Amino acid sequence: MHYFGTIFKESAVSALALNAEALYSELLRGVRAMCTPETRLVGITSGGAWLAERLQKDLGLSGKHGSISSAMHRDDFAQRGLSAGGQTSLPFEIQGADVLILDDVLYTGRTIRAVINELFDYGRPANVRLAVLVDRGGRQLPIQADYAAARVALPNSQSLALVRLDSGEFSFEVQEENS
């Protein structure tokens, strides 16, 4: 697992404005090193899909990126139901593919587990790797990113969300969770 920069502690994060554009530049560097001409980018709805879209363009990759939803395979589907975030769109063959899943924030690992289940509904890839903008720790499942632009520690009462501005640039929002 590769990390860039500093590990930000809980007390620093509340006052810290994470520079999403700087982290995106680091993610671009890391993903460039991971990609081959056969690599297919698949972003998790919605933040990961935004990253996949921009990376596909910035890397000059041919074809289209995919987007994938975790909604149908979540272990909390009964409580959450279907989200309005988007549906799975994989405009390439998954069987035997080299897939790089992209997400904005890795936390418990439950979304990644659900996404992998969804991915295998479309075929059996030869290789699946994960790259994230931010790994905030707190894993509940044995899942880790192959590449993370940063590691940030947040209290369980907060969430970190990637926001895409009208200009196409990224920023982060730290939100208080409702208990």
Image (cartoon, helix red, strand yellow):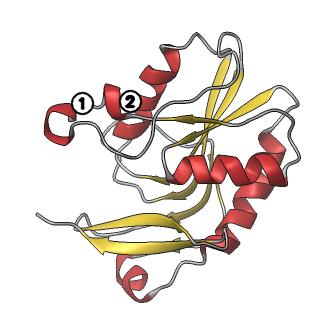
Vertical order, 144 against 6 (above or below): above
Numbered badge on residue 75: 1
**Amino acid tagged 1:** Asp
Q: Who's the residue at 28% across and 37% down the image?
A: 82
Q: Which residue occupies the foreground of this view, 61 or 150?
A: 61
The answer to whether one can see residue 115 in this image is yes
Instruction: Evaluate if marks 2 and 1 touch, with contact meaning CB atoms under 8 Å apart.
Output: yes
Mark 1 residue element: loop
The answer to whether one can see residue 8 in this image is no
**Amino acid tagged 2:** Ala
Q: Residue 144, percent across and down? A: 50, 41
Q: Residue 84, percent across and down? A: 35, 45
Task: Identify the image quadrant of the C terminus.
Answer: bottom left
C-alpha span from label 2 to label 1: 8 Å
Q: Who's the residue at 59% across and 10% down the image?
A: 124
Q: Who's the residue at 80% across and 57% down the image?
A: 29
Judging by the rendered image, the residue that carries numbered circle 2 is 114
Numbered badge on residue 147: none
Local packing at callout 1 (Cα closer than 10 Å; few below 14, some 14-19, many 20+) is some
Q: Earlier in the sequence, mark 2 or mark 1?
A: 1
Vertical order, 65 against 93 (above or below): below
Q: Which residue occupies the foreground of this view, 118 or 153?
A: 118
Q: Residue 6, percent across and down? A: 59, 73
Local packing at callout 2 (Cα closer than 10 Å; few below 14, some 14-19, many 20+) is some
In the displayed structure image, the side of residue 39 where residue 5 appears, left or right: left
Q: Who's the residue at 49% across and 72% down the image?
A: 172
